[in-house]
Amino acid sequence: DRFYRFLLFWVSADALLPTLIRDESWPDQERSINAANDMYREHATEWIKSQITDPDLLSKVIPSYPPFVKRILQDNGGWLGALQQPHVELITDTIKAIDATGIHYQSAAETLHAECDVIIYATGFHANKWLYPMDITGRNNQSLHDLWGDNPKAYLGITVPEFPNFYCMYGPNTNLAHAGTLFFNSECQIRYILRCIELQVSTNADTIEIKSEVNEAYNQRVQNEFSKTVWVHEGAGSWYKNSQGNITTNTPWRLADYWQWTLAPDADEFTVK
């Protein structure tokens, strides 16, 4: 039973991650980044083509970028079917402005206007505003919101220099975009936090704080790892990226590695006093 559970976990967690790592020798980096990634693209494209025959609509719904650059949503045919209803038009041009009667959008060299009775925005979240709308104050009245801006850095996504006795759950670079479950990550994080507290209590310390150099080195490793992945592909934007193009949301790590790193804190990485 335990081995069966392991197989289920591995397939749904870390098994996908290698398909998101760029193969420098792969010939067509615009459509896919390695052989396995291209297989996913072919599979998804064939599914779309089985649902849609109109070539103009096909050109709009088949992505021009590799699989997993953006978050992938599953469709049982309902979405693609809805796009083909006679009263539905899919417009993928750039929105220029919104006025009292509808939406102005750029189509080729001209600006067109679509009249609307109702506009539903799909922009109701702030992926790079961590802990928003709260603001946390650390040493010397340092605002965490001001310190981070939209480029947050936390060691293991959990603890931050200059903010002693402070921990995050589901912090920067802990979102899972290669499958897996956030419950697993959350369990890793709470175990690590509790063992940090145990370390503090066992030494009768007032504060425990991750060292700045440890945090910086870790986050440099994070961005170095991202440079190999599909998520930094320049073919499309995504909510994974901040204004500088850095990934501050997702984790680049295997769950197996994150589990290992969060088993217990290394006292040498902290200032405990």
Image (cartoon, grey):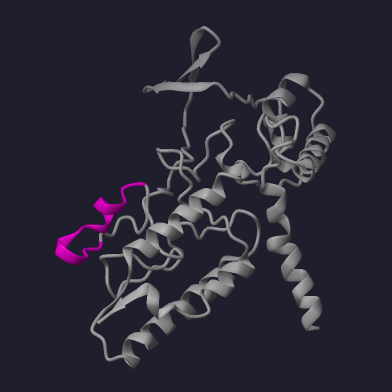
- Give above or below for 152 relative to 34: below
Question: What is the x, y in percent for residue 264?
Answer: 48, 80
Residue at the farthest left position = 140
- Toward the top, the furthest residue is 109
Quadrant position of the N terminus in the picture: bottom right
Is 141 part of what is drawn in magenta? yes
**In the image, residue 83 lies at what x, y percent?**
69, 31
Q: Is residue 5 left or right of residue 189?
A: right
Image spot of residue 249 (x, y percent): 48, 52
Q: Residue at x 66, y 58 (%)?
A: 179
Q: Is residue 164 a member of the stretch shown in magenta?
A: no
In the picture, measured across the screen, residue 241 lies left or right of residue 164, that is right
| In this picture, residue 197 sits left or right of residue 254 | left
Q: Nearer the viewer, residue 9 or 124?
A: 9
Question: Where residue 263 sits in the image (x, y, percent)?
Answer: 53, 79
Range of the magenta residues? 136-150
- The residue shown at (75%, 43%) is 37
Q: Residue 273 is drawn in which quadrant?
A: bottom left
* Viewer-closest of 96 and 248: 248
**Residue 222 sits above or below residue 198 on the image:** above
Total marks placed: 0
